[in-house]
Amino acid sequence: MVIGTAVARAGGQVIWWRAALALVVALALQVGTNYANDYSDGVKGTDVDRVGPLRLVASGMRTPAAVRKAAFASFGVAGACGLVLAAFAGGWLVAVGAACVAAGWFYTGGPRPYGYAGLGELFVFVFFGLVATAGTAYVQLGRLDALSAVAGTASGLFAVALLVVNNLRDIDGDASSGKRTLAVRVGAASTRVIYSACMAGPFVAAAVMAAWRLGGLVGLVALPLAVVPVRRVLAGTSGRDLIEVLGETGRAQLAFGAAVAVGLWI
């Protein structure tokens, strides 16, 4: 959302209350999706052999009904704020918002969850990258442009990298439970290459952004932070050790986003 607002600044117009609502929408969708995944994986029993942090339902810390209610409440907050934005920025955004909620729920929910079919990375790239970034810029500028698409690509690749390393960590448990993530489908070796490509992509995008705003190059300052987890993944780090890599990936994403936002803003 920060990058999307910086794109709006580069386009000549920032509307702070819309930026704030877009941030609430994005956070609520993320929280709702996390709760929805916790609920669906928990009731299906696919978290039994989970390597990562404990889930609420699978661990018994919360009942499935409570977690489901939390997911719906979070999606409700996102929907309410989204409706306000749609009233001012365009009614067609209602359809986009509905698609975002559906993507969050059906990642692991429903009879045919797309996350179990190896499509999670594609949807994460689209909704947590392109839609989130370009959407934030759109509700302020009233238009879509190439810069927002490139910036959204960078954001989406980082989001995918987080999911890829998460699935790499859980590859054995997911395979045994029938959860056919992309990592399970292509194998650990190829997953490590995919992760590395996703971590490299945002920095290529930063260079491309310089065609519109030279400040996009500021994002390259985060490159050293990205090198560390990539080296660890390519070296064969697995299992619980990838939890630390997940944190390193998140820090690289945060640093890149902040750097690009500053660069585009100035």
Image (cartoon, helix red, strand yellow):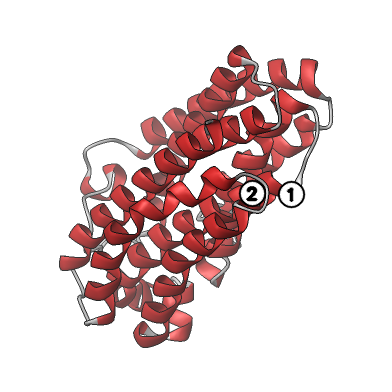
Q: Which quadrant of the view contains residue 140?
A: top right
Front residue of 217/56: it is 217
Q: Position of residue 239 (x, y in %)?
A: 20, 71
Q: Earlier in the sequence, mark 2 or mark 1?
A: 2
Q: Within 10 Å of the Cα at label 1, are there few (<14), some (14-19), or many (20+) other Cα atoms?
A: few
For residue 255, above or below residue 23: below
Front residue of 147/104: it is 147
Residue for point 22% across, 82% down: 235
**Viewer-nearest of labels 2 and 1?**
1
Kind of residue at badge 1: Ala
For residue 255, above or below residue 240: above
Residue 47 appearing in the image: no
Q: Position of residue 107 (x, y in %)?
A: 54, 54
Q: Within 10 Å of the Cα at label 2, are there few (<14), some (14-19), or many (20+) other Cα atoms?
A: many
Q: Is residue 122 left or right of residue 91?
A: left
What residue did someone put label 1 on? 146
Q: Position of residue 88 (x, y in %)?
A: 78, 16
Q: Secondary structure at mark 2?
A: helix
Residue for point 63% across, 25% down: 79
Q: Secondary structure at mark 1?
A: helix
Residue for point 70% across, 15% down: 84
Residue that sits furthest to the left in the current view: 241
For residue 72, above or below residue 125: above
Kind of residue at badge 2: Leu
Which numbered dot is residue 130? 2
Residue that sits furthest to the front in the current view: 214
Q: Position of residue 125 (x, y in %)?
A: 57, 57
